[in-house]
Image: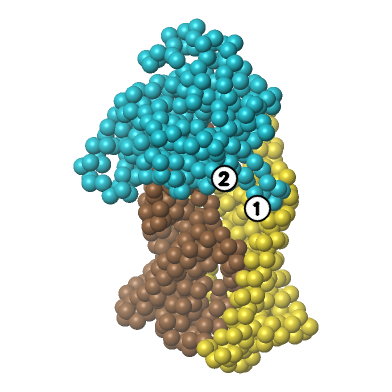
Chain colours: A brown, B cyan, C yellow
Amino acid sequence: MKILKGLGYAIGLPALLVLVWALATAGETNFFVPTPGTLLATFAETWFGDRILSDVLPSLGRLIVGVSAAIIIGIVAGLLIGSIKWLRDLTEPVLEFFRAIPPPVLVPVLMLLMGITDSMKVTVIISGCIWPVLLNTIEGVRAIDGVLSDSARTYGITGGARIRHLVLPSAAPQIMAGVRQCLSIGLILMVISEMFASSSGLGFTIVQFQRSFAIPEMWSGIVILGLIGVLMSFIFQITERRILRWYHGLREVENAV
Amino acid sequence: MPSEITDKNTVTNPAPAGGTPPNPDAMLSVLGVKKVYQTDGGAIEAVRNLTFDLRAGELACLVGPSGSGKTTLLKCISGLMAPTEGQVLLNGVEVSGPPKKMAVVFQEYGRSLFPWMRVRENVELPLKNQRLAKAERDRLVDEALEAVGLSHVPMSYPWQLSGGMQQRVAIARAVAYQPEVLLMDEPFAAVDAQTRADLEDLIRSVWKKLGITILFVTHDIDESVYLGERVIILSSSPTVIQEDLVIDLPAERDQLNTRSLPRFTELRHHVYEQIQLAKAGHRPAAASR
Amino acid sequence: MDNTVTSRRRPTKELLGIAGIIGFLLTWEVLPRVGIVDARFLPPASDVLLALARDFGLAAFWLAVGETMLAWLIGLVIAVLAAALLGFIIGSSAFLRKFTNSTVEFLRPIPSVALIPLAVLLFGVKMESSLMLIIYASFWQIFIQVLYGVADVDNVAMNTAKSYGLGQLARTRYVVFPTALPYLMTGIRLAASVALILAITAELVIGSPGLGREIALAQSGGAISGMYALVLATGLIGVLINLVMRFVERKTLSWHSSVRAEVIV
């Protein structure tokens, strides 16, 4: 009964919206908005063919490489900068400035420096989404509790063991908040780098559909980008729940008091 | 040397003010330790000149008015902070960083345990870090958890436990580490009275069982007299030793009977007087140069 | 005493920060000068700063800045109003929260740039295209924060208000709104930077008027120093927005402990 109720809440509004959409587009043939049936059919024939290999997978590949590199470089550099006070003070204004630059302007800049290549697109993703991870890691490392740090020292936990058992877990909540931003910026940059400078990839294909007025295909492209976004957010949430289970539990206890 | 009082009106000898050579029997020697913090608002002298020894297997309490530099002193002894002058010797070797044979239990239990590790992992981590074999680790962790009465919650996270239980975990971690010296910085200041009594008895029993040297810092006069074999009274800041007092209560102590002994009351009264004197700014003759 | 401590310490921190900026600019100056990087593609810092200084004297530059900021402001205001209104309504009702949850969780992660083709189709290269992207992206930032905020309302405070006979409207005004305000402000601060990103993106990719379009034009026209100068300008605007939003957040919430704590740190 409870599950049924939950299911009802989960699909109630989406079902209602699709129904409204179907009714609104049923009578006339609206040029801009396809019917749900048309969209579904177009989606299948547009994306479940050659385009998976030629556009979807390469785009996703670049996204995964770029985002993973940004996360790894951001965390490593953040651990370094966060642990050394003078380095933190030295780099803080410059890093804050880089973070404030809207990442998409990197596309024309890097196009110029590297040409229109795969590595340019990956670099765009890395250099755009490294900042939230880097700055959040620095902040997380800086904010390690003094008593906890002293405890680790008195038990001889130093060097690599300190990073692994103290610094990383303690900064993890901040780092994960940075990773969440990194993922959404990464997806934006993947699309834009392909819209701006490419002859293949999801972003390019979708703009082509729009330019050739292939409206249902264009919509199907919007849907696939949406699905990728939802999927990424889903994977992130599962990972975050796992890594930060202790943190959510701790917060719950603290809030209950 | 610690002085003894035979009568509460007896005037006791102030402790030596520094410059004495280290005692060869001492496990831990604090020699002329001075700590001055350099702030931009000027220098703040937290500890002026402290000298005392702990013999192996001694349980000593350090009491003093709040702000008397107790925590500063403890940080110097534990090697977390270098003294401005003087030195700390552990088994005759100068302490220059956290020594391997020393464990510290902090007041802030909520901030000294790793919240991302379960109780067992918290106790095990220092041993793992020393690369002890798994079987040996398991044995030490089991014994330590047993000793503090926490065998039933090894898989809980610390923050799922009450404050008193969290502090038990911190004590278990220290015990499993097999230190020669255990430093405790007002460990029970943040737990409720009932739990506190239980934890005091726990410390006495652990001390007897393991025969380790314990330096217990507190601001609670009753606690210092009940727990210690010896009470070192600090003056107000800048800190020197106001008095070094032997607690000649029977070794078997319990909350009800010990605390109602006339001798307990006398000692407590004496320590209380000394603390009041310290607060009023009175300093022992030898230190008030 | 605390005051003297911080006021005496701060200069070294600030000096280091300034040294960092100078060091960065020097590196940037030297790399193309000695030929490690091709000066045609990365002109020395001095060239770019000169170009930026020249831009500051040009009406066209300020016009572009104005267009970008106008789109940013209109988009942000619409997003704030819509998200705050919907957030308070949906957040206050357990039924509506559950009813909309799956839809919100599905719509929120959709990247706003996916709407670019649709925006072009509907509005072409006009500011409305920028607005559509800006509003979509900013809306979720604020909406989610307001939902958290309304959910954070203290039960005791709510029951107290009920027992004193405060009606639905009065409860919203005196209990829900003050609790949710810090969350709303956080949402607006986050949305402000997201809105700038989307404003520039729309101009860059779609070609609606503003700084982003100027960057694309400078790049394709080979005015490389000019392009870098404009990139710097967008960064400066970003920094400015961050500073202003933090300032506003503090001013409006000076009574709130989370903000007070931040000031001390």
Q: Are marks 2 and 1 in contact (CB under 8 Å)?
A: no
Q: Is residue A187 above or below residue A112?
A: above
**Residue plotted at (36% across, 26% down):** B207
Amino acid type for the residue under numbered disc 2: Glu
Q: Residue at x 40, y 76 (%)?
A: A62
Q: Which mark is residue B101?
A: none
Determine the chain carrying the residue at label 1.
C
Residue B157 seen in the current view: no
Would you call the spot at circle 2 few (<14 residues within 10 Å), some (14-19), or many (20 or more)?
some
Q: Chain of mark 2?
A: B
Secondary structure under badge 2?
strand
* Label at residue C185: 1
Residue under label 2: B85
Residue B189 lies, with reference to residue B111, above or below; the image says above
Q: In which image quadrant can residue C25 be found?
A: bottom right
Q: Position of residue B138 (x, y in %)?
A: 24, 39
Front disc: 2 or 1:
2
**What amino acid is labelled 1 in the image?**
Met
Residues B91 and C38: in front is B91
